[in-house]
Image (tube, rainbow, N blue to C red):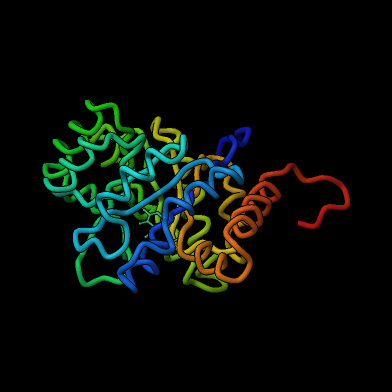
Amino acid sequence: MVSIAPVRLRLGVNIDHVATIRNARGGAHPDPVRAAQIVAEVGGDGITAHLREDRRHIRDEDLIRIQAATNLPLNLEMAATDEMLAIALRHRPHAACIVPERREERTTEGGLDAAGQHNRLAPIVAQLSDAGIRVSLFIAPDPRQIEAAMQLGAPVVELHTGEYAHAEGEARAAELARLGDMAALAVHCGIEPHAGHGLTYENVQPIAAIPHLAELNIGHYLIGEAIFVGLETAVRTMRDLMDDARAPASPGRGG
Ligand code: PXP
């Protein structure tokens, strides 16, 4: 593999689960907008939100309020449906990450089959791109999916780190190697690689150390941790871990 200078690794914070807690009582508290403002104050690089078909967390009106409340780029995670396409074209987020979505799943399980769904995805990617929205495809770290993303003209892929996060021992090491190889392949194909899903303080550093990655999107763990230490501290701690993983090794520094 060609060695490259690491790019700065951005941190996008997924604030969906602030809305999950709010929705549990049907009121207005806690407000995901306040979370977005805190993320902006502590140096987060972007806000990520997944508008699901069943609106179980973020809702349409949240998108408007989040966009109005901070200057951070909004990364809208969306299913490849006509409804979501219309919403994205109306709200014009900075980026749209196309994810597979099944109503019964607890979270986004598995990556998008970009290879098998070319004809369905092509017009959606084209319309988002024509509107100036940076399209990302949430895919498994698989060369077929990177190839498909290239065929679709997607400028960004987000590599699904769920398998890595759930694996242990050798299986985790193998998945990490796969993620590193696919990040490098994406760059080779002219695609900016991002990564996310299931990342925590414990497992983020080997991912952050992959030099080709430009962005991590992290949600559930940060919002959960915020219950105990506050969102500011949770985001700062994650940022520090990411920076530490990217810092050049120096004598006396642990490996
Ligand atoms: N990236 C994408 C595309 C996602 O769909 C999600 C949430 O499902 C995340 C990142 C964040 O994952 P997590 O909440 O596990 O950190």
- Closer to the camera, 163 or 194? 194
Ligand 1 sits in quadrant: bottom left
Residue 49 percent across, percent down from the top left: 36, 51
- Given residues 187 and 63, the one toward you in this image is 63
The residue lying at 28 percent from left, 34 percent from top is 92
Left of 65 or right of it: where is 194? right
Q: Quadrant of the C terminus?
A: bottom right
Residue 73 in the image: state x and y as whole percent: 43, 37
In this rendered view, identify the residue nearer to me: 48 or 170: 48
- Location of residue 94 (image quadrant): top left
Residue 53 position in % (x across, y down): 19, 59
Q: Residue furthest right?
A: 252
Residue 131 vertical placement versus 42 (above, below): above
Kindly identify the residue that appears in the image at 23 percent across and 33 percent down.
128
Does 83 sit left or right of 171 as displayed?
Answer: left
Q: Residue at x 66, y 57 (%)?
A: 237
Q: Tag count in the figure?
A: 0
Q: Quadrant of residue 230?
A: bottom right
